[in-house]
Image (cartoon, grey):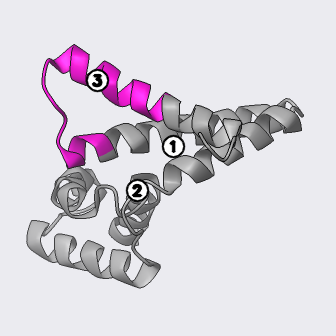
């Protein structure tokens, strides 16, 4: 507020409003993992908006969404690297012993608690799918 960075302040206020809304809806104070899931949901919304704005050639709106995406990403835990994600996928595949692509849900169920907030689950899903189909 004191730095008069209104764009950043607006993004933080949106985040706080989303957290507060979920607390009111669920009638409880959110744990850290639940706050991270709210942030991830907002980041997913921003990514989808960016894709739509760029498709419509609205670069001004896409730039604003990219800025908000950067602000929101700063509140997530440190993201895992590709090697760490690959190791986690290998461990989950070894545990779940999937019979093929149809058992992808078992592998994802094992990965979700381990990687939530630390990796883009869409990217993880694509990696699991390629591993199980290949």
Q: Secondary structure at mark 3?
A: helix
The magenta region covers 14-35
Give the quadrant of the N terminus. top right
Above or below for 100 versus 122: below
The residue furthest front is: 2
Magenta span includes 29: yes
CB atoms of marks 2 and 1 within 8 Å: yes
Using residue 55 as the reference point, say whether residue 51 is left or right of it. Answer: left
Give the quadrant of the C terminus. bottom left
> Marks 2 and 1, Cα distance to the nearest angstrom?
10 Å
Using residue 78 as the reference point, say whether residue 69 is left or right of it. Answer: right
For the point 37% across and 71% down, the residue is 131
Q: Which residue is mark 3?
A: 22
Above or below for 64 versus 106: above
How packed mark 1 is, by other alpha carbons closer than 10 Å (few <14, some 14-19, many 20 or more), is many
Q: Residue 87 in the image: x percent, y percent?
A: 29, 82
Q: Residue 34 in the image: x percent, y percent?
A: 23, 41
Q: Secondary structure at mark 1?
A: helix
Which corner quadrant of the image does residue 65 belong to? Answer: top right
Of the numbered discs 2 and 1, the one sitting upstream in the chain is: 1
Q: Which residue is mark 2?
A: 76
For the point 87% across and 32% down, the residue is 58
> Marks 2 and 3, Cα distance to the nearest angstrom?
18 Å
Of the numbered discs 1 and 3, the one sitting upstream in the chain is: 3
Using residue 78 as the reference point, say whether residue 4 is left or right of it. Answer: right
Q: Which residue is mark 1?
A: 43
Main secondary structure type of the part rendered in magenta: helix
How packed mark 3 is, by other alpha carbons closer than 10 Å (few <14, some 14-19, many 20 or more), is some
CB atoms of marks 2 and 3 within 8 Å: no
Q: Residue 126 in the image: x percent, y percent?
A: 45, 59
- Of residues 67 and 16, the one drawn nearer to the viewer in this rendering: 16
């Amino acid at each position: 507020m004191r730095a008069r960075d209104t764009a950043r302040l607006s993004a933080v206020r949106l985040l706080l409003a989303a957290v507060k809304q979920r607390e009111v809806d669920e009638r409880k104070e959110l744990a850290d993992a639940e706050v991270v899931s709210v942030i991830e949901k907002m980041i997913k919304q921003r990514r989808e908006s960016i894709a739509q704005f760029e498709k419509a050639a609205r670069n001004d709106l896409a730039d604003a969404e990219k800025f908000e995406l950067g602000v929101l990403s700063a509140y997530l835990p440190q993201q895992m690297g590709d090697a760490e994600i690959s190791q986690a996928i290998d461990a989950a595949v070894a545990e779940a012993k999937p019979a093929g692509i149809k058992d992808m849900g078992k592998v994802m169920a094992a990965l979700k608690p381990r990687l939530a907030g630390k990796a883009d689950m869409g990217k993880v899903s694509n990696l699991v799918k390629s591993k199980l189909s290949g």
